[in-house]
Image (cartoon, rainbow, N blue to C red):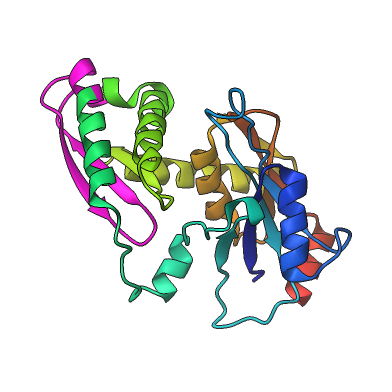
Amino acid sequence: MEPFIEFEGKNVDKAVTAACEKLNLSKDDLKYDVLSNGSSGIFGLVGVKKARIRVSMPNSPKKGGRSKTISFQDDAGSTRDGIQSLVDEAFDDTPIPAYPEEALQLGKQALQKILDLITTDAQISVKTNLERVLFDVAGGDSGVIIGKRGQNLEAIQYLVDKIVNKCSDQRIRIQIDVEGYLKTRRESLNKLAARLAEKAKRTGKPSTINQMNAQDRRIVHLALKNDKGVRTQSVGEGYYRKLIIFPKKKSDKKKSASR
């Protein structure tokens, strides 16, 4: 099983450079998939998103037979990104960070005002863990809050994230859930990923999922990263991109099995 490490940068080249420097590898020796090309946003101020790559390390020593994915940022963002779920399990005794209460309250108040403008009787509870702050919404018209394919919820989350981090010295990862929507969405995407992966392996042809946001693409990437019969890759430009599930050739499977 190949371990993976994720790196971020202002663009893909910066992320690749950061990976090469961190791992002491040349660009020719670096094996990676582009998870996100990033976005310069509006005037470089609003909507800026970092590029992200996933580097596979087939020759790394294996510990406990589990693959772990860790995110790093380049020099422009020296703070280590949120540790993903597999690492959380390995270090589940790590204390939860002391998030600034003022920032969390400001985020909750802003979210409540937005919800009050589009629905009624929506209530918010705040939950924190090692990776992020969760604003959990109960009540109100969940269909209106979530929107088609979660687009309304995504836009609301973007605004609250900007508000919270504007008054916080540390980077706080924000997530908003509505009536368990995120869990349902994750389960749905995991089933879709498994179904399309089996189709790709059966037919020998790639399977494509169109118009996916970064969060949904990440769920699919993680769902299939241990499937030795397929590989995933995001393609296209912009925030909403395609995700393609490629069947691995027999020669690729033999190489994986020999590692």
Q: Nearer the viewer, residue 50 or 221?
A: 50
Question: Does residue 74 show up?
Answer: no
| Residue 255 against residue 200 in the figure, above or below | below
Determine which quarter of the picture holds residue 32: bottom right
Q: Residue at x 28, y 44 (%)?
A: 103
Tell me where residue 176 appears, x and y as whole percent.
Answer: 32, 39
Determine which quarter of the picture holds residue 228: bottom right
Label tally? 0
Q: Give the quadrant of the C terminus.
A: bottom right
Q: Nearer the viewer, residue 114 or 59?
A: 114
Residue 115: say if magenta.
yes
Q: Is residue 124 left or right of residue 249?
A: left
Tell me where residue 157 appears, x and y as whole percent.
Answer: 37, 33
Q: Nearer the viewer, residue 107 or 29?
A: 107
Q: Residue at x 39, y 28 (%)?
A: 150
Tell me where residue 215 appears, x and y as whole percent.
Answer: 49, 41
Q: Residue at x 52, y 53 (%)?
A: 223
- The span picked out in magenta is 114-142
Q: Outermost residue, left direction?
A: 121
Q: Outermost residue, right direction?
A: 28
Tell me where residue 4 appears, x and y as whole percent.
Answer: 64, 64
Q: Is residue 181 left or right of residue 173?
A: left
Question: Does residue 151 show up?
Answer: yes
Q: Residue at x 78, y 59 (%)?
A: 31
Q: Give the quadrant of the N terminus.
A: bottom right
Residue 84: say if magenta.
no
Q: Is residue 122 left or right of residue 165?
A: left
| Residue 99 against residue 102 in the figure, above or below | below
| Residue 145 against residue 255 in the figure, above or below | above
| Residue 163 against residue 20 in the figure, above or below | above
